[in-house]
Amino acid sequence: MSVTVVTGSASGIGAAIRDQLLAAGQRVIGIDRQNADIVADLASAEGRKAAVDAVLEACGGKLDGLVCCAGLGPTAPSSSLIVSVNYFGMSELVDGLAPALERGTKPAVLLIGSVASVHQGMDKLPMVGAMLANDEAGARTQADAMAMPQAAYAGSKYAITVYARKKAVELGPKGIRLNVLAPGAVETPLLDASRADARYGEAIRNFVAPIGRNSAPDEIANVACFLQSAQASFVHGTVVFVDGGMDAMTRPERF
Ligand code: NAD
């Protein structure tokens, strides 16, 4: 039986992916702050190490899949928290679990990015440089100094996408596939909180994808499960937008 770790398994997209993998007969090890097989706080280095250790014990050191969904939106309590969870809560799980994945069967990793990662100027942000240099303290300081949670969100999603594309080159020869799924607006508690926020709510409500509606979590999970499956055996190092056309609308000449 295939064994897949899903972070953020208690809610939204992660819960939908967990349910679909279970329905397909896989074993799922869910990680979240609550209501999960492994309860861990991915915001801290200690919490991430505890999560990796617990996974290694639960899977006996051999893992077939990893899907990193746990993330915070721009309404999170601080920009530094967004950086820690959205970037280091994914990169350190990939780094920590890569040896176990190498021992797995047709192993595959999927990171949930965002269409927000394509916002212009993300590559110039000092916090992004610090994330990519694996400097969590520096990235947190830069993020809080900027005091723009929306930029911390988009910057963390841009940085984790760059991390993934570089990591894919390293993991390919080890037989591990790695991709990024970039959703548009998905009906989850994270989107509810952003829509209700006095700072961002109106812009989010007005920004409608060409397809004319937001996604259900299952529509994201459908693509996530395909990317993790043997049917996607040659899909590696890529970013798949599942966004109802948002990326096409905002930058039709870039792909
Ligand atoms: P959600 O709030 O429903 O689920 C996120 C989950 O992550 C929650 O269960 C939460 O407890 C968990 N989590 C947060 N911080 C954590 C921590 N420190 N340690 C462990 N777990 C933690 O949100 P969602 O919309 O399902 O988001 C899932 C992913 O999809 C996120 O990475 C988000 O950035 C991304 N995304 C969402 C949307 C959207 O519109 N909903 C769009 C693009 C990308």
Image (cartoon, rainbow, N blue to C red):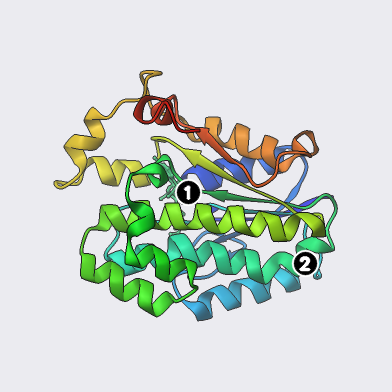
Residue denoted by label 1: 11
The answer to whether 86 is drawn above or below residue 120 in the figure is below
Give the camera-side residue of 128 and 194: 128
- Residue 113, given in percent of the width and then of the height, sits at 49, 48
Distance between mark 2 and mark 1 Cα atoms: 26 Å
State the SS at label 2.
Answer: helix
Indicate if the residue with disc 2 has its beta carbon within 8 Å of ligand 1.
no
Disc 1 C-beta below 8 A from ligand 1: yes
Q: Residues within 10 Å of mark 1 (few under 14, many from 20)?
A: many
Q: Is residue 75 visible to the viewer in this orientation of the structure?
A: no
Residue at x 30% of width, y 41% of height = 192
The label shown at residue 208 is none
* Residue at left offset 70%, top offset 44%: 236
What residue type is disc 2 on? Ala
Which residue is pictured at 32% across the width and 69% down the height? Answer: 80
Above/below status of 60 relative to 203: below
> Residue 200 placed where, x, y %?
20, 44
Provide residue 47's location: percent of width, then percent of height. Answer: 52, 76
Image quarter of residue 86: bottom left
* Observer-nearest of 90 and 124: 124
Q: Secondary structure at mark 1?
A: loop
- Whole-percent x and y of residue 223? 61, 33
Of residues 250 and 41, the one drawn nearer to the viewer in this rendering: 250
Residue at the disc numbered 2: 100
- Foreground label between 2 and 1: 2
Left or right? Give the position of 89 relative to 72.
right
